[in-house]
Amino acid sequence: MPSEFPTPRLSDLEPGAQAVVVGFHGELEPLKRLREMGLVNGTRVKFLRWAPLGDPLEIELRGYRLSLRRHDAEQIEVRPIQPPVAG
Amino acid sequence: MPTEEIDVAPEIQTELATVALIGNPNSGKTTLFNALTGLRQKIANYPGVTVEKKIGVFMTQHGREARMIDLPGTYSLTPQSPDEAVTRDVLLGVLPDTPRPDRVVCVVDAANLERNLYLASQVIELGVPTIIALNMIDLAQTNGDTIDVAELSRRIGVPVIPCSANTRAGLAELRIALSAPAGAPPDWKVPLPPLVDQSLEMIRTELPPNHHLGFAQIRAILILLLTDERADRLVVGLGWEHMRHRFRTARASLLEKLPTWQEDSIGARYGRIGEICEGVLRRGADAVDAKTSFTDRADAVLIHPVWGWLIFLTIMGLMFTSIFTLANYPMDGIKWLFGQAGEWVSTALPPGDLRSLITDGVIKGVGGVVVFLPQILILFLFIGLLEDSGYMARAAFIMDRVMSGVGLHGKSFIPLLSSYACAIPGIMATRTIENPKDRLATIMVAPFMSCSARLPVYGLMIATLFPTDDVPAWQKAGLLMGMYALGTLTAFAFAWLFKRTILRGRPLPLVLELPPYRRPSLRTVLQGMLDRAKAFIRRAGTIILGLSILLWALAYYPKSGAEKPDDQLAQSFAGRMGKFIEPALVPLGLNWKIGIGLIGAQAAREVFVSTVAVVYSVGGADNNAEAGTDSVRKALLEDKWPDGRLVFTPLVCLTIMIYFVFSMQCIATLAVVRRETNTWRWPVFLFFYMTGFAYLASLVFYQVGTRLGY
């Protein structure tokens, strides 16, 4: 799957990974509410986990936690960032 | 403490100032509402829509009464559900019967400042004098966040009052702020691309002059109109009908010239919020990074692939067991009370029409429904605790994959589960589902979940099916479980079907906030229970009472003068109807006597048992149905067709059970669906599709069963 996408998507992140939102695909309407909740270009997110049955997923952004489905997360381009080295 | 009887009728008391309470879901808005208004609340519906309107009365710090409207929670003023549209329209004062608010209190979760300020900034732009209640300030401080409240207030241009609805800290300050005269509306607006601003300015000059609205407000309203195609009520309410076409073309031309202007303006608003928060909000130990809060540690267990499921199933099991065991005691009490009332009336009144009306019509009919009140209370106690603690969102998170398989939402899970107790609270619980089509699909299948009113019927049929007592209990329990499974699977199948046919629509993404865990507020939970109980009792006192009387009349008139109750029933309208529908019942292996039971069950399923008891002449009409299960069973087993075959073969018992699994036989449910969907179309459809399916399924089952020699 990843080879189809030139840039990684939110759904490609590993639990614990952090990234910055860099773009959206598809139409405005379906993802409008996600943007209104603060998932906009430049927002820093942390991937927390997949649900036990493999969908949806949970992320942290702007100090709160949000769940969205894989299908929608695949529409969101991210640029992974390296976590700061401990110590 | 004043009682809830105090009239806070919104229509007339125009001299009261109106304060609208608005905020994100999970911002503690309802807790704040309860803390400010106490028990002086009233729930109604907004005219024309099915959205709950919560109004309370509170005292300002100067001892003056004011009205407070608790608006449906939302993340944005660009609505995605009818509830959210109401929030926007009340703010703008375009809903009939709801005054334009004089003040707005915008509840902002201090621990989640940026996202909450998105809505707050939209509200402030609309120009209604706004106060920000910076709620859960204690929680933010525990997290190590610090907020420079004075600077935030200066930058955003409205008073900011730190408070905690849970501990009631800061409420006096909030009341004082509400008593102070409103300042000038702040000059804050979201930056937009020049082309959009030009377009808005063009439209503004074409609008009829309006002395109430300043430039900034009109700009804000126009932004809302251009970002929502379904804002018709708003256009009409503002008196701008003649501009409809103008808005449509402006929308289209903007989208053509600047396809991403809406996305960009959302981003720009967050940019502005970022500037405001810069230096005002200082997060504690670098929040996004490795910080193990209580919520982190709890989620590690509660959403764990193994422990998560175990805990989830345990909680659901506990909820169920409580509904079916704990509720028994108060239910017995209610039965006893209604029985006493019946006996008292029987001794106080001479035999006759009036006595029969009161005992058999009113007391039995209403009592048969009110008896479910304890189950409803316990269910909403659990729902309230799960909701307020933050676990409910996790349940939806865990179950979403299962529900999305049939096109439903993770939030459909609780309403369906609740429907095992009674479809009425289940359907009322669908209000948490934002997407109207998902909500409707959930409502339309919820009555397939075997409710507790079916239990007496299953009980009687299983008892008749296994007449001897040497049948192991697990076989009976297994059959009972089978009926529950049958209903559940059918609910899922129809949900799948509906989402692909009549309820197909643009799929809205799952947007589920997982709030931090917190200790539930007992007050909020109890208030929620009280609201549900009141709604339920009100229905029992009106629509159910009326239908009980109708059903009673059908069974009581015309009077034959017969001594025995079964002869009377055979002569009655209900009896004639039973005989009339018998040709349709024979292919199902049922006779006209069962037909009378089915007609009785049309009001409420459990009435089947008491009606059958009367038809088969087991004691008089005043006999307690529960006490008589054994004698009813005996009478059923002796019933024969004219040719001497037994009526109640095992196959027939199963056919009746299958009919009851599928059939829509609850007037109260239909009434609730009517209320929740605001049209008769859906309850009528619900009735015909379920009953039709029940008939077909029973027909096929019986006919195949007969061919196979059962």
Image (spheres, coloured by chain):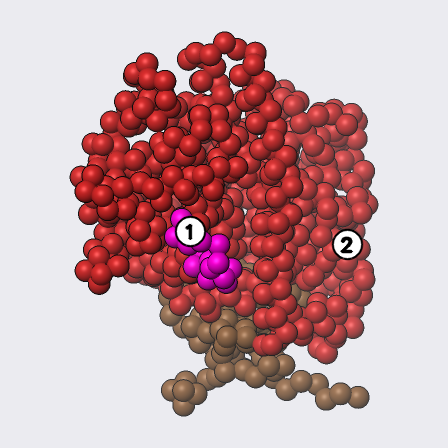
Chain colours: A brown, B red
Residue name at image x 72 percent, y 43 percent: B523
The answer to whether tags 1 and 2 share a subunit is yes
Residue name at image x 67 percent, y 85 percent: A83
Left/right placement of residue A51 relative to residue B526 reads left
Residue name at image x 62 percent, y 61 percent: B315
User: For the residue marked with disc 1, what is the amino acid?
Assistant: Pro
Image spot of residue B14 (x, y percent): 59, 21
Q: In this view of the protein, which residue sits in the foreground, B235 or B333?
A: B333
Q: Which residue is mark 2?
A: B137
- In which quadrant will I find the N terminus of chain B? top right
What span is in magenta? B464-480
Q: In this view of the protein, which residue sits in the foreground, B312 or B118?
A: B312
Q: Which residue is mark 1?
A: B467
- In which quadrant will I find the C terminus of chain B? bottom left
Q: CA distance from mark 1 to mark 2?
A: 65 Å
Say what secondary structure mark 2 lies in: helix
- Examine the structure image and report whether residue B476 is included in the region drawn in magenta: yes
